[in-house]
Amino acid sequence: MEISKEKLEWIYTTMYRIRRFEETMLEQTFKGNSMGVTHPSDGQEAPPTGICAHLTDKDWIGSTHRGHGHCIAKGLDTHAMMAEIMGRATGQCGGKGGSMHIADFSKGMLGANAIVGASIPLAVGAALTAKYKGIENESVGVSFFGDGASSQGVLHESMNLASIWKLPVIFACENNGYAEATPAWYSVSADDIASRADGYGMPGVVVDGMDVFAVYDAAGEAVARARAGEGPTFLELKTYRYHGHFHADDPKKYRKADEEEHYHERDALTNFEKRVTSQKLLSAKKLKSIRDSIEQEMLDAVEFALSSPMPDVEALYSDVYVNYSNPILGLR
Amino acid sequence: MEISKEKLEWIYTTMYRIRRFEETMLEQTFKGNSMGVTHPSDGQEAPPTGICAHLTDKDWIGSTHRGHGHCIAKGLDTHAMMAEIMGRATGQCGGKGGSMHIADFSKGMLGANAIVGASIPLAVGAALTAKYKGIENESVGVSFFGDGASSQGVLHESMNLASIWKLPVIFACENNGYAEATPAWYSVSADDIASRADGYGMPGVVVDGMDVFAVYDAAGEAVARARAGEGPTFLELKTYRYHGHFHADDPKKYRKADEEEHYHERDALTNFEKRVTSQKLLSAKKLKSIRDSIEQEMLDAVEFALSSPMPDVEALYSDVYVNYSNPILGLR
Amino acid sequence: MTTHNKINPLGPGYEGVTGKDLRFRDVFRDTLRAEMNRDQDVFLMGEDISGGFDRDTKEPLDAWGGPFAATKGLVQEFGPERIRDAPISEAGFVGAAVGAALTGLRPVVDLMYFDFVTVAYDQLLSNAAKSRYMFGGQTRVPMTLFARSGAGTGHAAQHSESFYSMLAHIPGLKVVVPSDPYSVKGLLAAAIRDDDPVFLVNDKKLINLTGFVPDEDYVIELGKGRYMQRGDDVTLVGMSYTSIVCEQAAAQLADAGIKADVIDMMSLSPFDEDILLESVQKTNNVVIVDEDTPRASMASEFAAVIADKAFDYLDAPVKRVTGPHSPVPYNKGLENAFMPQPEDVVGTVRNMLGRD
Amino acid sequence: MTTHNKINPLGPGYEGVTGKDLRFRDVFRDTLRAEMNRDQDVFLMGEDISGGFDRDTKEPLDAWGGPFAATKGLVQEFGPERIRDAPISEAGFVGAAVGAALTGLRPVVDLMYFDFVTVAYDQLLSNAAKSRYMFGGQTRVPMTLFARSGAGTGHAAQHSESFYSMLAHIPGLKVVVPSDPYSVKGLLAAAIRDDDPVFLVNDKKLINLTGFVPDEDYVIELGKGRYMQRGDDVTLVGMSYTSIVCEQAAAQLADAGIKADVIDMMSLSPFDEDILLESVQKTNNVVIVDEDTPRASMASEFAAVIADKAFDYLDAPVKRVTGPHSPVPYNKGLENAFMPQPEDVVGTVRNMLGRD
Ligand SMILES: Cc1ncc(C[n+]2csc(CCOP(=O)(O)OP(=O)(O)O)c2C)c(N)n1
Ligand SMILES: Cc1ncc(C[n+]2csc(CCOP(=O)(O)OP(=O)(O)O)c2C)c(N)n1
Ligand SMILES: [Mg+2]
Ligand SMILES: [Mg+2]
């Protein structure tokens, strides 16, 4: 698929932003500035980037506990994200959601979700809205989930629903080989998870999830299908998380060094850089200027978050309902 | 597959017993002698019969709201079944379960289950017990469920578990074309539900569920695989229910006459009779004597049930737990 | 057309309104129709609600009119996009409804039997109820779910539940329990128009009952109870079908000269604390009647609120009359014994007032 | 080795027993090990409980020691058949556990975070809890489930629930809530040996606490509470982590000259009515403390039982101190405000006794 220069710049900016956001966020977590558990997605930059490259704010994505990359690719503000992780009033959810619940409905981001598999039908619902309103051509639903989540029944229900109703959905399975410490070869009864798509009457495509160009191409077809009213597609993106399952997890306990090396050699950013510079699509200077601006953005984001106020205690009692006639306060 | 004469007699006895039990039970329901809703399975005699022909009391089956046929094929006593449907103390569950909850643990029957799909993992659990105890060769689990149930996520979870753990399970999907009034072509996103087995690393076989010989052969292979420790098999048995979804449902409202005729022409009993008499495997006289004895059995079962006492009101409070230190009685 | 002259059951403002005696099931369906006409974003989803499809034309057949005929005729009127028939995938389609609600529609989900909510429990609790809060108030989940609860029809353990207390426990979810044709019209309309997720629990025993329904369009404010009748001696608190049980008990008590306030809670979350306290402050005696099993139930909740906030007015222990701590049995005799009967309520009141 | 000399928290019979101060998490694991050694039919199932597998040898790695290190070392001892690692399919493997329990094994399921029980809710409620009853007593379901509940660790709305009241509501299921190393040993052993399905809810805030544990093998009878300390002025009722909150409150109250009975319920279904009534009959004042959200909660249940059966002994309204009717927020300050604090209990007691 042809990619414009602007798009290439956007792709690099987005992947680099994800990479550096995760590294920065981890640093902050280790400094004790995050208020809870964080699940870094560095290494997995290509899938959200290559897919969201085809989306606008009117398209919707559902996400997971490992959701920062999806948020960034969907255009969320890293300042508000960092502030959310630090539990600040200026955070994306006012400090009430945290790392596992970042959402921005104005950007078509239905929220990170900490129940594995639970966000999958939400994207189907968003696609249902699009079909209902006759705007499939401008609003598709993308559900991001992992290899581990593929064992949840709700995925299969969602695939069946999307297929019989011909909804504009992309099932984007980021297979990073592990669910916590459990390898996919243990928990998944198929060589390729994408092979299950067949039984649900939709195309299933195995994609090199370390190569953003491959992801871009496969997603482009899937999104085009969806926009054309041809129904759902299943993409399995073979990828790898560079860090542990969560900030304090040491993946060396359950992954081998040669495997880690194998994926690092195929690093999505490095290989993108090589390709665009060797093919003279973007200059090394341009890439550097993108990196520089992101470095500054990260410094600013941390600064913004750290200097932001904590929410007032009253926030505890708001937003449970739009309106409710009983007090929400606990019995004290 | 070779079938012994005794087995042929058993098959005919079983299929005829199912047929006549359902017809008798419906009659009694219309007379007001059943205490609740009943879901007849006549027309679908071949699947339970052809499968259970390979099983013993040490094998386990899970069943559904349409469970009478499974019960009978697994050797349950029709007197106790009829008494259960009439809510009597002598019923299989003492009158507390009714048509949708007939069980007999001494016969390897894990119970009919009225939550669609919910009994599927129970059969997986029974197979887990067999594997745990190293008795797969004599104890397999069979899960019966319908085309409608195939849309429940728990089926897919169960298939995945059975496959990765290589459990001795047979997934027996009785596709009778409808879930209530909803046709399978509307709700199932695959031409053959069995095609989904592929994605779970197990054989998926489409079987003519009106032909007990075809079922017998396919089930024989599946059971042999399970007993040999080779793991699960998925059987899709294309069949048809002659009556409505439940006793008071008129299927003519949503099924066409030509379709009903098509299946009646392929009636499992009539064709069995033709085949065994023309091939001189069983005599017409033998078949008649089987039918006669079943007719008598049905008269006796109704008589037994109708003359059985109702449970004492104390039964309301027993069997909630094996032991419990608070009163079960309501607050009155 | 009749004119309603009992004041209380319809609440203030309904003196002398015109209306008709209608069946609960018809009112339910007519209200769905009215709300779908009112708002193009309202659509219905559930199993068998378009009742099969013609094999050749693919047209919906409406063979059953949906579970309990709740949607009879609607698919012809609104088409299969707005009366969306779903496979047996409760978690999947409740989740899809949440997604649709988050993106601009107002889904109404028919879950058929109340018992099936357990299959979709996570989508309801973790997504529908929490999205607004955990995302810091940036979104809303305007969806309605309904399903049929209750024993009494021989459906046994897995089709007879009344565990609405578990739903009322969930922060972020609202729960309403109509008890007659009047209340189902007002509560269903209010639920569909509400911007929060609302679960309407509908006892099967109500479906064929007839009652007075005003002609006009109206909603019943979520969280409000009502008096079914007034009396000074004891407060009987009912919800869903037990409001009728309370009325029957009150009639029997009246014969013995005992006058009861009968309260129909109508909403369980939010619920009407004021009406409970007002009545108990007057009668000084209260019996709460609930078909749900007793432990950590709404009966417990109302008892706890009264024991806290009306403590000084109580002349006698707060009593609950509930189903036993057991599943629902099949046999009719046992099933009748499972459900709170008017006689149980009468016995409890007589004991309480020392009038044996 | 130390000798325990506080009488009450261990209950009668534990005066002067020998034991050690141990961490909750270690006691938990040691009890699992002991029960697996005791009975070959006991096995464990859950996500990540064998902690990954070597790519080449396929041997379990025990990288994490299971969620919260509850099973650390067990897979080496018992092998992957008895420490069975499960995919993320809670409904599937809870259902499989029910099937295994129905056919002769005694499964123990680690559900990791308590919140995930909603995904398996139907298997728990419709199968595990109902099988014995609906099949007329012909079978039993000897299974145990456990999971970590509670706020306080920054896990936010979907990993911090304490809704054990919903489980206690379910007839056929038993629910226990240990509050220290002593009680988790006795309750976990009792749960695994019990012939009914038992859910053990384990507040995360307990996991790293240390406390006295007798050396000997013992079980705590399901349905029994205990006094953590005695006092005549007020009864504080705790469960799970709030038993510790009650003890802390009691210490503050003691400074003000107010003496509290502190009850740790330990079991929620069945539960110890006698201990509640005995204490309230003596103190005439009661505050129930619960981190679960308030509506139709166990706090409501205990209040209702007391308002019914100890009504004549009460000097003041029955008070509950609970979490708000809201999901759990992420921000630490908000999260702390969500959880009942000793100060909240102290304030309530002071108000109640008119000692501001
Ligand atoms: C229903 C549910 N079960 C278990 C968990 C605990 N958990 C959180 S992440 C995770 C692994 C998810 O693996 P995968 O889907 O592959 O995503 P990845 O972490 O690799 O991105 C598990 C088991 C959960 N959050 N929700
Ligand atoms: C979880 C759940 N959803 C819905 C129902 C209502 N219901 C009972 S039977 C049935 C249709 C089942 O269809 P299928 O699995 O094909 O079995 P069949 O009735 O054809 O034997 C439905 C929807 C139910 N009992 N449980
Ligand atoms: Mg993964
Ligand atoms: Mg069917």
Image: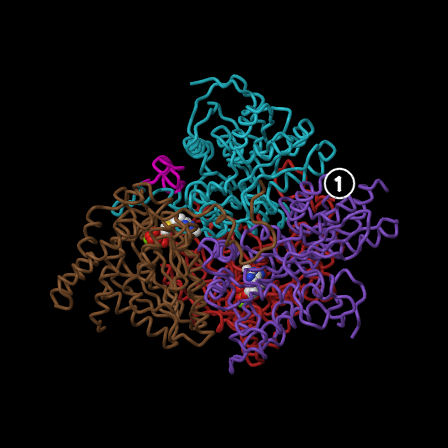
Chain colours: A red, B brown, C cyan, D purple
Task: Provide residue C356's location: percent of width, then percent of height.
Answer: 60, 31
- Is C286 displayed left or right of C152 in the figure? right
SS at mark 1 in the image: loop
Q: Is residue B240 above or below residue C16?
A: below
Q: Is residue C248 visible?
A: yes
Magenta span: C62-83
Between A330 and D350, the one lying in front of the other is: D350
Q: Is residue A12 visible?
A: no
Task: Provide residue A87's location: percent of width, then percent of height.
Answer: 70, 55
Residue assigned mark 1: D314
| Residue at image coords 67%, 30% | C280
| Residue at image coords 80%, 71% | D3
Chain letter for mark 1: D
Ligand 1: does it lie within 8 Å of the C-beta at label 1? no
Badge 1 amino acid: Leu
Q: In which quarter of the image is the N terminus of chain B?
A: bottom left
Between C252 and C43, the one lying in front of the other is: C252
Q: In which quarter of the image is the C terminus of chain B?
A: top right
Q: In this view, does D187 lie above or below A266?
A: above
Residue D307: image quadrant is: top right
Task: Provide residue D126's location: percent of width, then percent of height.
Answer: 48, 54
- Is D339 displayed left or right of A264 in the figure? right
Q: Is residue A49 above or below residue A121?
A: below
Q: Is residue C190 magenta?
A: no
- Is D344 displayed left or right of B275 in the figure? right
